Image (tube, rainbow, N blue to C red):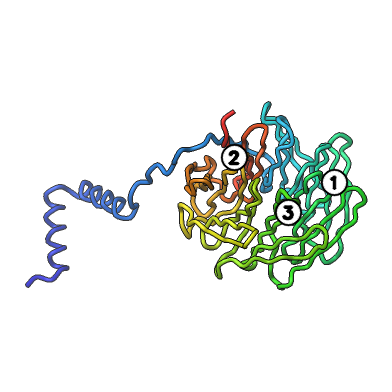
Amino acid sequence: MFGLTAILKAVLHFYFNSFGYRLVMRHILILIVLVFAGPAHADISTNPVEIKEWKIPSGGRSRDPFAHRLDAVWFAGQAGNYLGRLNPQTDDIFIRYLDDEPGPHNLTVDAGGMVWYSGNLSGYIGRYDPVLDTIEKITLPEEAYDPHTLVFDYGEKTLWFTAQNANVIGRLSPKDHKIDIVALPDQFSRPYGIAISPSGVPWIAVFGSNHLVSVDPETLKLTTVTLPDDARPRRIDVTSDGTVWYVDYRRGYLGRLKPIGSDIKEWSMPSGSNARPYGMAVDSQNNIWFVETGISPNLFVGFNPKSEKFFSITPIPSGGGSVRHMHFQKETGQVWFGTDENTIGRAQVEAR
């Protein structure tokens, strides 16, 4: 019997003699491409939303936009050490560099137009006045050395923040700069995303463990809710009925917590365990929006809590890289986000 090698040599000899070297090699190359390239990518869009992105020339990981007005979307340049402002009506971009290089991680804007940012590498919260071009630095206690994500409560009486590696949650009074610190009991909890419920209670995603926590604004007492063992919640938001929603970065799940009774329900995301969900936001209809960052391009996904269905999937045009935080602007029905491709993006999630 002929061995496999002998048969293969005979077949190649026949083809080379019959069709010539170049034609045979061309056919072999085509076969290799078909075998190893896999199936062509199908259109993964489902009921897509309109997304527009602006490239930020300064680079520096433009992130965490906050849409303050129709003509002013502020964002942080974490690696570039700047505060930025985009006017989406004119496409103008303003950059205000921070000479002390504090690694601004996140920002928010108060009703008066003051920009509050976390000096993540320098242990302070900054307040920038864009009219006077002045910065006030509020130094945090040593135990809150790396302010992470900031959020105002309703009425802006308190600015709550997380400090991931310091393992604390803090609150700052904008009026007198009084600071309170709440330490998490576990050493590597890594408090991360934070959102305020309609009742004024802050909820925090504890990225280093399988927990969500809330803080009583009156007593500063912590309440801990345990999620499934392997869960790693990263960002969090709250719908108008007080229901808490989180994205599980490790397992690829969207989770819902009803605080009364601590009822938890989860849905596997469209990309499953590869989803790596990160930034999320809630619109005025209480739909949940988040980005799957483990997929290239990143996918902007919508979920309807009433039908309990994922109803919209849109690839991010720039690819995204990672979308770390998002902000819903009620006046326009738009979700704003930043990407690791150094773009500021806008998704039109509600008709206007």
Q: Which residue is mark 2?
A: 285
Q: Do the numbered discs 1 and 2 sit on residues whose CB atoms are within 8 Å?
A: no
Q: Quadrant of residue 277?
A: bottom right
Residue 241: x %, y % from top left: 64, 48
Identify the secondary structure beneath mark 3: strand
Q: Earlier in the sequence, mark 3 or mark 2?
A: 3
Q: Which residue is mark 1?
A: 127
Residue type indicated by callout 2: Gln
Left or right of 61? Residue 315 is left
Residue 38: x %, y % from top left: 33, 52
- How far separated are the C-alphas under marks 1 and 2? 32 Å
Q: Quadrant of residue 161?
A: bottom right
Identify the secondary structure beneath mark 1: strand
Residue 123: x %, y % from top left: 82, 59
Left or right of 103? Residue 324 is left
Q: Residues within 10 Å of mark 2 (few under 14, many from 20)?
A: few
Whether residue 235 is visible to the viewer of this picture, yes or no, is yes
- How far separated are the C-alphas under marks 3 and 1? 14 Å
Could you tell me which quadrant the C terminus lies in? Answer: top right
Could you tell me which quadrant the N terminus lies in? Answer: bottom left
Residue name at image x 49 percent, y 41 percent: 314
Q: Nearer the viewer, mark 3 or mark 2?
A: 2
Front position in the image: 98 or 52: 52
Q: Which residue is mark 3?
A: 149
Residue 180: x %, y % from top left: 85, 61
Residue type indicated by callout 3: Thr
Residue name at image x 56 percent, y 57 percent: 255
Q: Earlier in the sequence, mark 1 or mark 2?
A: 1
Q: Residues within 10 Å of mark 1 (few under 14, many from 20)?
A: many
Q: Nearer the viewer, mark 1 or mark 2?
A: 2
